Image (cartoon, rainbow, N blue to C red):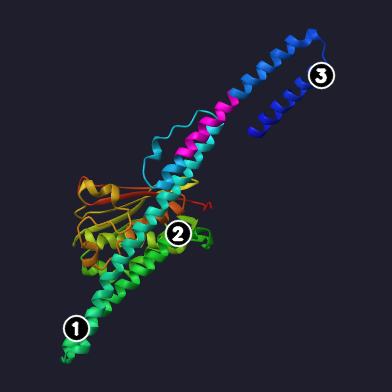
């Protein structure tokens, strides 16, 4: 645009110069008018360019100095201002991503530190103290439990990173939802029985979608794990279809447990977020389960929300696309 205006003014100026050289006296007035118009146009477009350039310079100065609020910078309502707004928007996204990764790195380091410290403590005790077979087995079992937690944490972090950074590398396949849930039932049968939890599933065998089996499995398993770990004992879990359309299927998952305080609902899907300090650590969870649930739903072109039920318990309503769109 700037180049176009410059060329236009050069053409006008050249035409004026040519007329002046070859014109007679009667054309002097016309030449003067053309010159005045050219100068006005030049000043007008210069102001249009200078205003966003000044705002951009202000933005660069703020970023370089590392202080100040660049959100207050105003750009004119034209295409130059639009370019400036897009530059700031891009920087804002990069800045937020940087802060998010810094916080995530801090959280991961903190979460890894706990099991590693525990394992080290158990092994040091075994090495430094004489103890009988039963005592040795006790510390070995504790160390082993922490290695399982560490393995679960690493696996969940890997799953989340793959969803966000390499989602396009997953193999897409036909998934029978009811069959997938049956496999989860078998895998979690002992834990469900141990806690007196019944699982009621109202999903027809013909319900199928295109998707990533590993993530659909993780979605339902992490929801059930969350209920087992935090909803309490002697409850029931219900999974059902609410609406079936040609392009999307709505599911509902809920338990009859204790739910969570309403003030925490908006943050349940955040990585490592805990309603109660240490609750995931005590139960052996990674603190990433519900984050995996949300990201799995989003990858399958769906939406999800959570609420407390009036009769008690936590309810998740979510959708999954019938076909996988990349």
- Pointer 1 and pointer 2: residues touching (CB < 8 Å)? no
Placement of 94 over or under 23, stated as above or below? below
- Pointer 3 and pointer 2: residues touching (CB < 8 Å)? no
Residue wearing tag 3: 21
Q: Nearer the viewer, residue 127 or 141?
A: 127
Placement of 119 over or under 99, stated as above or below? below
Residue at x 70% of width, y 16% of height: 34
Residue wearing tag 1: 138
Numbered disc 2: secondary structure: helix
Q: Residues within 10 Å of mark 1 (few under 14, many from 20)?
A: few
- Of pointers 1 and 2, the one earlier in the residue sequence: 1
Residue wearing tag 2: 163
Residue at x 24% of width, y 63% of height: 280
Q: Residues within 10 Å of mark 3 (few under 14, many from 20)?
A: few
- Marks 3 and 1 sit apart, C-alpha to C-alpha, by 104 Å
Q: Residue 64 in the image: state x and y as whole percent.
A: 43, 47
């Amino acid at each position: 645009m700037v180049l176009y205006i410059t060329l236009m003014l050069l053409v006008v100026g050249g035409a004026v110069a040519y007329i002046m050289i070859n014109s007679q006296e009667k054309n002097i007035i016309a030449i003067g008018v053309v010159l005045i118009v050219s100068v006005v146009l030049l000043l007008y477009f210069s102001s249009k360019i200078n205003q966003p350039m000044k705002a951009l310079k202000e933005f660069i100065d703020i970023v370089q100095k590392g202080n100040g609020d660049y959100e207050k910078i105003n750009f004119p309502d034209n295409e130059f201002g639009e370019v400036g707004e897009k530059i700031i928007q891009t920087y804002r996204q990069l800045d937020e991503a940087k802060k998010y990764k810094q916080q995530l790195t801090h959280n991961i380091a903190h979460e890894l530190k706990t099991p590693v410290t525990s394992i080290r403590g158990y092994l040091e005790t075994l090495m430094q103290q004489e103890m009988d077979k039963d005592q040795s087995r006790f510390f070995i079992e504790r160390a082993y439990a922490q290695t399982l937690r560490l393995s679960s944490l690493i696996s969940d972090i890997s799953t989340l990173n793959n969803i966000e950074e390499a989602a396009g590398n997953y193999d897409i396949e036909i998934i029978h939802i009811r069959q997938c849930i049956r496999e989860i039932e078998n895998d979690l049968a002992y834990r469900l029985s141990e806690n007196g939890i019944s699982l009621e599933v109202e999903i027809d065998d013909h319900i199928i979608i295109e998707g990533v089996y590993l993530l659909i499995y993780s979605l339902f398993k992490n929801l059930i794990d969350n209920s087992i770990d935090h909803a309490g004992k002697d409850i029931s879990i219900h999974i059902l279809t609410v609406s079936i359309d040609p392009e999307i299927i709505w599911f509902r998952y809920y338990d009859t447990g204790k739910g969570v305080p309403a003030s925490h609902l908006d943050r349940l899907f955040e990585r490592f977020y805990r309603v109660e300090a240490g609750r995931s650590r005590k139960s052996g969870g990674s603190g990433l389960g519900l984050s995996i649930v949300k990201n799995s739903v989003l990858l399958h072109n769906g939406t999800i929300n959570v609420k407390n039920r009036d009769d008690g318990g936590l309810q998740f309503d979510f959708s999954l696309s019938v076909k996988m769109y990349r």
